[in-house]
Image (cartoon, rainbow, N blue to C red):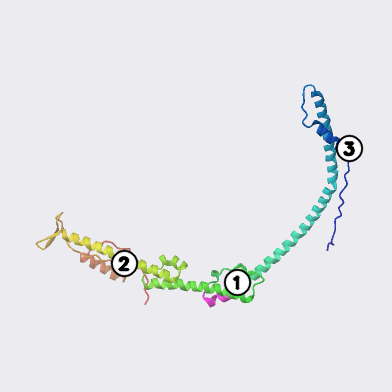
Amino acid sequence: MVKDFTVDFKAPEITVANEEELADAIKQYANKYDGLVVTEETLADSKKARADLNKLSKALNDRRKEIKRNYNVPLKEFEAKIKQWDSNLHNAMDSLDVGINELKDREVAERTKKVEETIAEMAPNYGVDVGEIEIKTGWLTKSISKKKLLDEIAGEMKFVKDHHEKVAMIKKYCDDKKISFEPYKRLAETFEPLEVMKQIDDDIEAQAKREEAQKAAKQAELERQKENTVEVNGRSFDKETGETVKEEQKVTFTLQGTEEQITGLARYIKAMGIQVLDHSERQTVIVKG
């Protein structure tokens, strides 16, 4: 273990010989030439004074820079030592971090496995699939108690089970109404059953109104066609074209029977002169019982 350490620091002393005299001389120079008006008669003296002042300024700054370089030498050496020592410490910390993180990963993996085993054990009791339960981050912490973990998993499973029951309720409602569940599947996943059922009822009512309107429109068209028909000697004719017309009925069936029955029916329909407007391809199905 590294013992406590201290770093001694003594600020070096920098002195200027004849400092007061030098400061006073510089002040006199500054006052003497500050605001001086240069003329043709004083130009030569002004240039010489300018050169002397520049020489003195350069001498002062050269010495300042030299002292600063020497002043910084021990600081740079000290900084280099600290940086090297700090680098060594960080190398050691990085190595420890690797080990600590590996241990954390192993512990999380072990806790994850235990949670997965708990979910698999509890799932059948709630009638849910293991894949439907998403493991939450809080379930993998060291601090969570066994009771809290079981309660939270049970709560999640109950939520999923209730959701399944709600969807099943809506599906049964569709079956009872003899309509397809598919258009309402997404709604069943999102909204409460009563809301979806109301939507189903509204759709059924709207569809009934549409069918009634279509039926009324067809009946109105039939009545119009009848009004445009005239009967002569027991036969009906179109008033505009003179073509003969007669009333027939159209109906759609979906039939199932043996090949012989379907073939016989087709022959009967043909023999009766019934016009087949449309038909599907024959499909073979297996019927039990």
Q: Looking at the image, is mark 2 or mark 1 earlier in the sequence?
A: 1
User: Residue at position x 33%, y 65% from top?
Assistant: 207
Side of 138 where 272 appears, left or right: left
Q: Which residue is mark 3?
A: 21
Distance Cα–Cα, label 2 vs label 1: 51 Å
- The residues colored magenta run 117-127
User: Residue at position x 58%, y 73% from top?
Assistant: 152
Q: Which of the pair 53/256 is nearer the observer?
A: 53
Q: Looking at the image, is mark 2 or mark 3 earlier in the sequence?
A: 3
Query: Which quadrant would residue 147 be assigned to in this image?
Result: bottom right
Extreme-left residue of the structure: 233
Q: Mark 3: few, some, or many residues within 10 Å (few <14, many ≥20)?
A: few
For label 3, the SS is helix
Side of 273 where 51 appears, left or right: right
Residue 208: mark? 2
Which quadrant holds the C terminus?
bottom left
Residue 175 vs 36, above or below: the answer is below
Amino acid identity at mark 1: Glu
Percent coordinates x, y for residue 284 in the rendering: 35, 68
Query: Which quadrant would residue 157 be assigned to in this image?
Result: bottom right
Distance Cα–Cα, label 2 vs label 3: 114 Å
Q: Which residue is mark 1?
A: 116
Q: Mark 2: few, some, or many residues within 10 Å (few <14, many ≥20)?
A: few
Q: Mark 1: few, some, or many residues within 10 Å (few <14, many ≥20)?
A: some
Percent coordinates x, y for residue 96 in the rendering: 75, 62
User: Residue at position x 90%, y 39% from top?
Assistant: 18
Which quadrant holds the N terminus?
bottom right
Distance Cα–Cα, label 1 vs label 3: 88 Å
